[in-house]
Image (cartoon, rainbow, N blue to C red):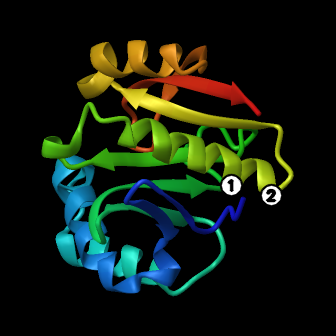
Amino acid sequence: MNIKTKKEKGILILPLDECSRYAAICAHWSYGQWAVRRGISFDINLLAYNERAASKTLPRVFVICTDSFPVGMISVKENDMRSRPDLSPWLSALYVMPEYRKAGLGRRLIEHGEEYVRSLGHTVVYLFIDASDESRLTAYYEKLGWVYVGENLDNDGLNVKIYRFDL
């Protein structure tokens, strides 16, 4: 299987560097879901996604499309938590448009991210869940086999739950 691009049943997962035209869409999703709460301007967020669209190194964004229409994304990062530099790599910024949720697309993005991390030679991957999504996402990730590691402060000083997945 090609780790960079995966297509099945009208669903395509590809790296943002191969579909850079979607960088602004990814920036919009990220801004609305996370960056605005963190006080990060849309322009700064857009710049970050444009940089990711121009690079094949981490952080790397993967976009899921249905019938050539982008509906979600996930990122793979070397480190997503300054307070835990010992943990690496991380899945981050999982987003699926609300009208496409509960169709297994988030699971497909997570599995694609896991496969990509495995292709880089890693045997474990991490993620964290913040308090705003905790009740819903804790059960979701645990159902997918992720294991609770503990709590820590994220880059904004907020308490989060850390999970790991053994590849």
Above or below, 13 against 82 in this view is below
Tell whether 151 sits left or right of 33. right
* Nearest to the observer: residue 71 or residue 35: 71
Residue 92 in picture, x, y percent from top left: 48, 47
Number of residue marks: 2
Residue 143: tell me if it is visible. Answer: yes
Pointer 1 local density, CA inside 10 Å: few below 14, some 14–19, many at least 20: some
Q: What amino acid does circle 1 point to?
A: Tyr
Residue bearing mark 2: 120
Which residue shows up at 58% across the image and 82% down it?
55
- The N terminus, quarter of image: bottom right
Which residue shows up at 38% across the image and 74% down it?
49
Q: CA distance from mark 1 to mark 2?
A: 7 Å
Which residue shows up at 29% across the image and 66% down it?
67
Residue 112 in picture, x, y percent from top left: 58, 49
Residue bearing mark 1: 116
Pointer 2 local density, CA inside 10 Å: few below 14, some 14–19, many at least 20: few
Q: What amino acid does circle 2 point to?
A: Leu
Determine contact: label 1, label 2, CB under 8 Å. yes
- The C terminus, quarter of image: top right
Tell whether 53 sits left or right of 88. left
Which residue shows up at 63% across the image and 67% down it?
58
The label shown at residue 87 is none
